[in-house]
Image (tube, rainbow, N blue to C red):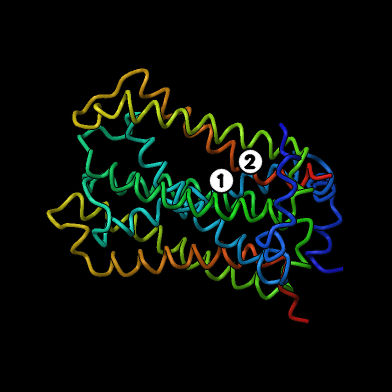
């Protein structure tokens, strides 16, 4: 995937800082997992609307949740970059990590499709076959992201 | 030989520790269960405190039902992970703190689900229920505490 080009991150002040104390890595793990819960909680409620679990107009709810989800994703992404900077060799050439990044990219494209093509459904009680697919696909992709995240350790060189 | 040591010496424990479908798969499913249970409880808490809004209160019970399924997945996979290393975990203070926090959050989750269902049947509003708001906050905080202590099990030592 060409992640070895990012190995220089280990020599940056950020990479050095992450491994400078025994307390930093576990603290980052805690932040990573807590923000994951905020993220998944928000995503679940959004995806459940797309799948038709509930149907009423909910633009205000989804807009509020999107802010929460984006904020949580940002925290998650930032701590993820810190993990990479602190221990790049664990992630480079790691199939689980590469698949995780691919799934995040795919989930991002899926979310953009929702934003630009399906968000009008939220002003009505509308649920379509496409919205159901996007909702279930999103749930599947994010579950896959979690699974791959946990598999990184088992596939590390 | 203690009960936990007997469990650790079973073929099931051996399978959990050596098979790719064992420990790696169980820990992955454990994380999914955690994200669902904690995530939806947090969203319901944010709703009860009016930080997020715009949804019919009748659906809160549905969200908590899914959160309960997430917890069940968490429980089954957690037990599977416990069996092969029970005597090690039981001596770990962080693990015991995690168990206490999980017990608190799961108990409140069950109560909250039935309480909100009762409110949805009657004329009461969930956001106006002080016990629902306070206990859901305790439940969310306990989930977060359980996640933090779960992450720290590998780093913090044993009691003796």
The secondary element bearing badge 1 is classed as: helix
Task: Indicate whether B144 appears above or below A85.
Answer: below
Residue highlighted by disc 2: A147
B11 vs B97, left or right, is right
Marks 2/1 in contact by CB < 8 Å: the verdict is yes
> Where's residue A23, x and y in %?
67, 71
Image quadrant of residue B6? bottom right
A111 vs A3, left or right, is left
The chain ID associated with circle 2 is A
Query: In terms of depth relative to the viewer, which is nearer, A111 or B105?
Result: A111
Given this view, does label 2 or label 1 mark the residue nearer the observer?
2
Query: In terms of depth relative to the viewer, which is nearer, B104 or B121?
Result: B104
Query: In terms of depth relative to the viewer, which is nearer, B76 or A98?
Result: A98
Residue highlighted by disc 1: B32
Q: Where is the C terminus of chain A found, in terms of image quarters?
A: top right
Whole-Å distance between the Cαs marked 2 and 1?
Answer: 8 Å
């Amino acid at each position: 995937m060409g992640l070895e080009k990012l190995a220089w991150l280990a020599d940056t002040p950020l990479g050095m800082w992450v491994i400078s104390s025994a307390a930093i890595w576990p603290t980052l793990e805690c932040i990573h997992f807590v923000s994951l819960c905020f993220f998944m909680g928000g995503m679940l409620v959004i995806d459940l609307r797309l799948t038709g679990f509930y149907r009423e107009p909910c633009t205000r709810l989804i807009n509020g949740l999107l802010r929460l989800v984006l904020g949580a994703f940002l925290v998650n992404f930032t701590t993820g970059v810190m993990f990479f900077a602190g221990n790049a060799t664990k992630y480079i050439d790691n199939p689980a990590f590469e698949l995780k990044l691919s799934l995040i990219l795919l989930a991002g494209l899926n979310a953009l499709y929702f934003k630009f093509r399906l968000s009008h459904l939220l002003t009505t009680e509308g649920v379509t076959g496409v919205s159901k697919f996007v909702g279930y696909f999103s749930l599947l992709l994010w579950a896959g992201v979690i699974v791959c995240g946990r598999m990184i350790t088992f596939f590390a060189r | 030989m203690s009960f936990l040591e007997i469990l650790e010496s079973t073929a099931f424990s051996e399978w959990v520790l050596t098979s790719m479908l064992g420990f790696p798969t169980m820990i992955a499913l454990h994380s999914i269960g955690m994200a669902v249970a904690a995530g939806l409880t947090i969203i319901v808490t944010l709703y009860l405190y009016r930080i997020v809004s715009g949804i019919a209160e009748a659906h809160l019970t549905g969200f908590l039902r899914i959160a309960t399924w997430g917890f069940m997945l968490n429980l089954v996979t957690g037990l599977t992970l416990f069996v092969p290393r029970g005597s090690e975990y039981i001596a770990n203070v962080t693990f015991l703190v995690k168990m206490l926090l999980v017990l608190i959050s799961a108990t409140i989750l069950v109560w909250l689900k039935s309480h909100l269902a009762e409110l949805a049947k009657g004329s009461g509003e969930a956001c106006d229920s002080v016990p629902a708001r306070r206990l859901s906050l305790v439940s969310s905080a306990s989930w977060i505490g359980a996640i933090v202590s779960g992450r720290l099990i590998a780093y913090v030592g044993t009691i003796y």
